[in-house]
Image (cartoon, helix red, strand yellow):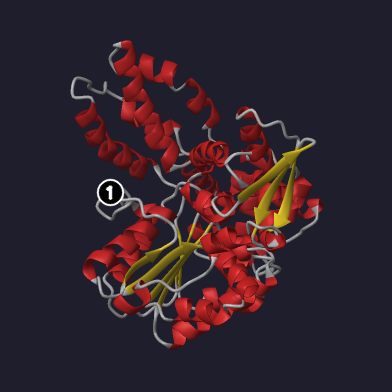
């Protein structure tokens, strides 16, 4: 395999896997010989080779063959065992940057300029997260450390993380802000172990003013990385340095995360970015409409189109914004006005995939909020009436609004037996006929969950 061929392959991989994955996992690879259908790739560590094999091998093989290189299998070889070792190590050696001494942004995850506070549409589901992020971005002392943001895909976690980093960069250019993903933290840690540069690693991470780690759930189950993360966390908190973390779920719900790490992550402010509601989705569409109309000044959006999209596309903000972009591009290409007919034709696949799917977890959260009790109490073993009745209502709604079986519902309610769920469902069916308050609660909750 020639360097020119590998260069072409790398460019295509960059477009496919994205800049972060490319920089972390593809760029350090050094190509070797290809013989008997086996392509050799030199890697800095065994761990690195195993990760690339599990996550990117099929894609790399596809690109190799597309380039005319016949290969059916990849063989990962440690760089230290080949003549290519110096080059591979040169590209991956951990070193402290000048940002440590001079202040500034030290980011291994490129920041997206669009992800600013000005472009973040605030609504009830995300107003607390937005307010907390704004406070941290001021760069002054705050009463909570860390700030832990969590929520599903496309709800705004990464947007807020980028906004904080960029705001700090503008307000406090002298501050040393380090922003990276948990995956990159782990990779740097592994590099430091391999190269015997743990002191450099510790110096880099413990000399920052603000540490920002995205997708922290990635370190779950990785004991050595968790150990180092824990010590880094403690060192920074002791120095009153700010830590900002994001994840796809609450600390208590991250499986295989050590209890001491969970405890540390919960010692500050933990904020849930709830799924968007109709008003927030409509606000986002109205905000993005201005940008689209600048790009397509001759196109107008017909009456009811934005409202229709806000009702029907509920999965996440990225899909919602993408649908509007696609709608304008399609209308421009085919020369039609943007009305309801065009919207349904253009977005038929998106609308089908976004048919409302209510989850048991969503029901549990809504019910606990409605009755002003903790989610852990509703799911937990306590049998107090103030917990038991909401629990039965949540079981009833789970049976009515999801396709989950009784045993599956029981498992999500603290591992209860299906007969317990059945009893709860029957009890609520009886009470809603005789208790007007319960009937009203069910109506309100049902409407909120379907909106």
The answer to whether residue 159 is left or right of residue 21 is: left
Picture coordinates of residue 220, whole percent (x, y) = 65, 65
Q: Residue at point 56% right, 36% down?
A: 5
Q: Is label 1 in a helix, a strand or a loop? A: loop
- For the N terminus, the quadrant is top right
- For the C terminus, the quadrant is top left
Picture coordinates of residue 46, whole percent (x, y) = 71, 61
Q: Residue at point 30% right, 42% down?
A: 283
Give the answer, above or below, for where 147 lies relative to 327: below
Q: Residue at point 47% right, 81% down?
A: 203
Picture coordinates of residue 377, whole percent (x, y) = 62, 68
Label 1 crowd bin: few (<14), some (14–19), many (20+), radius 10 Å: some
Q: Nearer the viewer, residue 45 or 396?
A: 45
Report whether residue 429 is seen.
no
Numbered circles on residues, count: 1
Give the residue number, with chain letter if any, for mark 1: 119
Q: Which of 13 and 336 is in front in this view?
A: 13
Q: Residue at point 41% right, 81% down?
A: 207
Give the answer, above or below, for where 219 lies relative to 52: below
Q: Which of 435 and 257 is in front in this view?
A: 257
Which quarter of the picture shows residue 102? bottom left
């Amino acid at each position: 395999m020639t360097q020119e061929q590998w260069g072409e392959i790398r460019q295509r991989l960059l477009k496919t896997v994205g800049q972060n994955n490319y920089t972390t996992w593809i760029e350090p690879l050094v190509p070797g010989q290809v013989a008997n259908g086996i392509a050799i790739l030199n890697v800095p560590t065994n761990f690195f080779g195993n990760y690339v094999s599990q996550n990117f091998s099929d894609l790399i093989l596809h690109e190799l063959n597309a380039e005319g290189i016949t290969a059916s299998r990849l063989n990962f070889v440690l760089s230290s065992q080949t003549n290519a070792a110096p080059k591979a190590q040169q590209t991956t050696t951990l070193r402290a940057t000048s940002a440590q001494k001079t202040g500034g942004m030290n980011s291994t995850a490129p920041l997206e300029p669009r992800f600013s506070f000005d472009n973040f549409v605030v609504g009830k589901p995300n107003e607390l997260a937005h307010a907390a992020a704004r406070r941290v971005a001021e760069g002054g002392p705050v009463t909570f450390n860390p700030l832990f943001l969590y929520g599903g895909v496309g709800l705004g976690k990464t947007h807020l993380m980028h906004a904080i980093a960029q705001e700090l960069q503008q307000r406090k250019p002298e501050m040393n802000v380090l922003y990276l993903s948990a995956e990159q933290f782990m990779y740097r840690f592994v590099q430091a172990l391999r190269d015997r540069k743990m002191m450099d690693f510790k110096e880099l991470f413990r000399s920052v003013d603000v540490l920002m780690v995205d997708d922290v759930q990635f370190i779950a189950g990785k004991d050595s990385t968790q150990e180092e993360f824990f010590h880094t966390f403690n060192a920074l908190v002791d120095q009153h340095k700010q830590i900002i973390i994001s994840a796809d779920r609450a600390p208590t719900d991250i499986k295989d995360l050590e209890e001491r790490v969970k405890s540390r992550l919960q010692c500050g402010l933990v904020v849930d970015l709830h799924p968007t509601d109709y008003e927030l989705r409509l606000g986002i569409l109205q905000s993005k409409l201005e940008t689209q109309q600048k790009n397509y000044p001759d196109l107008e959006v017909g009456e009811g189109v934005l409202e229709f999209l806000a009702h029907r596309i509920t999965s996440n903000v990225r899909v919602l914004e993408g649908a509007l972009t696609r709608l304008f591009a399609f209308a421009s290409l085919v020369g039609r006005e943007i009305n309801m007919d065009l919207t349904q034709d253009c977005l038929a696949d998106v609308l089908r995939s976004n048919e409302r799917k209510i989850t048991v977890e969503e029901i549990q959260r809504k019910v606990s909020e409605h009755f002003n009790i903790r989610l852990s109490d509703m799911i937990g073993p306590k049998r107090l009436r103030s917990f038991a009745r909401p629990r039965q209502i949540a079981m009833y709604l789970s049976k009515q609004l999801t396709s989950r079986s009784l045993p599956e519902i029981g498992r999500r309610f603290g591992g209860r037996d299906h007969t317990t769920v059945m009893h709860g469902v029957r009890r609520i069916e009886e009470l809603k006929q005789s208790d007007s308050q319960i009937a009203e609660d069910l109506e309100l909750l049902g409407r909120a969950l379907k909106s």
